[in-house]
Image (cartoon, helix red, strand yellow):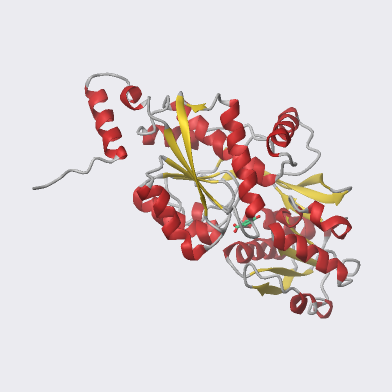
């Protein structure tokens, strides 16, 4: 005897087909059901605060939309991925294949993201990346169901390198964690320095999420460089900036980097961060009506200041809202939903942006400088910067 397993997904699919034959709008049968959104994010470890801020900001959009997207009520399923790539596949499978989420929002860590991508490429589940910058997600592993509202690791690092090259810097070093995000940031930074006729003479690395920085810092004075670029974030960034200053390096070789170095971390870094310049697609002092309203609302919800992670989470939910609205809540109408998302203009607190053909934001990289406990925007390091999207073939 054969038994047919009726999953939620197959029921919905059946409902969709019946409604379509009856000439009814396709969402008619499914619309009473909640749309299920999986949040796969770090809620523990060095990136915990990043995951929390993304979560608060997603909730903020739901508040703004009356707790409904495209007319459908929403159910959120959360999972702590611990920024642990070794558990990435299992965790993604839990949400996609066991919980059968309609949409997955995640994650922060580039290594974990690679596992998520494999799972959603197989299952076809809609994915919105609210932070992780692994280039491959919107280059060779791009897919119609994969979207990103953050950046590629190349983007802010290239912006920082470009700002230095414009100033005439010819010799630089780079310090980072040895994983996709750090290595890709080092590449972007080096490319821009090279384009300005200079070179990155050394890339110093330690394993993620280690913080034994002293052996690396000890090598910097001997490198004879004009600047040190870096990629660190979260708790690790707090410690790196403090140790760089404590080692007496700050006055000798300016430290700079992808803006994550000083993002959401200034409270912990204190005076050690003063004067550090970074490049990022967000910053303090934008003073636009959209950003001011967002910051006020976020503070009210999270009881702390907004940062780039909050912005990226907010925009992930805004992008989803745009897709859900276009199909009036019928998440089964995936093709139409994807088409609407791909051509959406997102009214972001960072400034409005659109997506490149590989589904990654085309956005300004601001040049920021830490002053008075803020990442003050002091210019634009790279205007409307699009990741090259090398190797992306939307199949
Ligand atoms: C990443 O792993 O891609 C990553 C993590 C934290 C950041 C930025 C990028 O702040």
Image position of 125 with respect to 69: above or below: below
Viewer-closest of 362 and 242:
242
* Residue at (81% x, 52% y) in the render: 267
Ligand 1 in which quarter: bottom right
Q: How far across and down, in percent of the image, does residue 141 sit?
A: 45, 55
* Residue at (53% x, 33% y) in the render: 344
Q: Quadrant of residue 193?
A: bottom right
Q: Quadrant of residue 103?
A: top left
Q: Is residue 157 left or right of residue 245?
A: left
* Residue at (62% x, 72% y) in the render: 207
Task: Report if residue 362 is visible in the image.
Answer: no
Q: How far across and down, in percent of the image, does residue 28 sit?
A: 33, 22
Image position of 332 with respect to 253: above or below: above
Viewer-closest of 244 and 167:
244
* Residue at (53% x, 27% y) in the render: 67
Task: Report if residue 53 is visible in the image.
Answer: yes
Image position of 2 with respect to 238: above or below: above
Query: In the rendered picture of this protein, how many numbered marks are placed on residues?
Result: 0
Viewer-closest of 156 and 393:
156
Q: How far across and down, in percent of the image, does residue 23 sit?
A: 25, 19
Q: How far across and down, in percent of the image, does residue 271 sit?
A: 89, 57
Q: Quadrant of residue 212?
A: bottom right
Q: Is residue 257 left or right of residue 20?
A: right
Looking at the image, the residue that sits furthest to the top is 23
Q: Is residue 102 left or right of residue 40?
A: left
Looking at the image, the residue that sits furthest to the right is 251
Viewer-closest of 209 and 163:
209
């Amino acid at each position: 005897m054969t038994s047919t397993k009726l999953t939620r997904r197959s029921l919905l699919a059946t409902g969709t087909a019946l409604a379509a034959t009856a000439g009814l709008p396709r969402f008619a049968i499914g619309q009473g059901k909640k749309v299920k959104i999986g949040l796969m994010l770090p809620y523990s470890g060095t990136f915990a605060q990043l995951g929390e801020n993304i979560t608060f900001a997603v909730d903020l959009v739901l508040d703004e939309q009356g707790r409904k997207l495209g007319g459908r009520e929403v159910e959120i399923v959360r999972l702590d991925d611990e920024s642990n790539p070794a558990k990435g596949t299992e965790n993604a499978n839990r949400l996609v294949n066991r919980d059968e989420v309609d949409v997955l929002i995640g994650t922060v860590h580039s290594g974990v993201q690679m596992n998520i991508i494999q799972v959603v490429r197989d299952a076809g589940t809609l994915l919105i990346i609210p932070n992780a910058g692994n280039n491959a997600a919107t280059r060779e592993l791009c897919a119609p169901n994969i979207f990103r509202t953050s950046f590629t690791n190349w983007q802010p690092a290239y912006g920082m390198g470009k700002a230095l090259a414009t100033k005439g810097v010819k010799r630089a070093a780079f310090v980072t964690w040895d994983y996709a995000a750090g290595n890709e940031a080092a590449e972007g930074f080096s490319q821009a320095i090279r384009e300005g006729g200079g070179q990155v003479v050394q890339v110093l690395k330690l394993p993620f999420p280690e913080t034994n920085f002293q052996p690396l810092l000890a090598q910097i004075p001997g490198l004879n460089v004009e600047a040190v670029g870096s990629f660190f974030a979260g708790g690790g960034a707090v410690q790196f900036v403090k140790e760089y200053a404590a080692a007496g390096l700050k006055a000798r070789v300016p430290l700079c980097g992808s803006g994550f170095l000083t993002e959401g971390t200034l409270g912990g870094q204190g005076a050690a961060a003063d004067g550090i310049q970074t490049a990022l697609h967000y910053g303090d002092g934008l003073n636009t009506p959209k950003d001011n309203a967002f910051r006020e609302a976020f503070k009210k919800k999270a009881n702390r200041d907004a940062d780039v992670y909050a912005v990226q989470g907010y925009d992930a939910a805004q992008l989803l809202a745009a897709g859900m609205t276009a199909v009036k809540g019928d998440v089964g109408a995936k093709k139409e939903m994807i088409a609407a998302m791909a051509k959406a203009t997102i009214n972001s607190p960072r400034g409005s942006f659109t997506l490149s053909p590989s589904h990654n934001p085309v956005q300004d990289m601001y040049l920021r400088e830490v002053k008075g406990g803020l990442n003050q925007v002091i210019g634009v390091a790279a205007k409307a910067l699009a990741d090259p999207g090398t190797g992306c073939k939307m199949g």
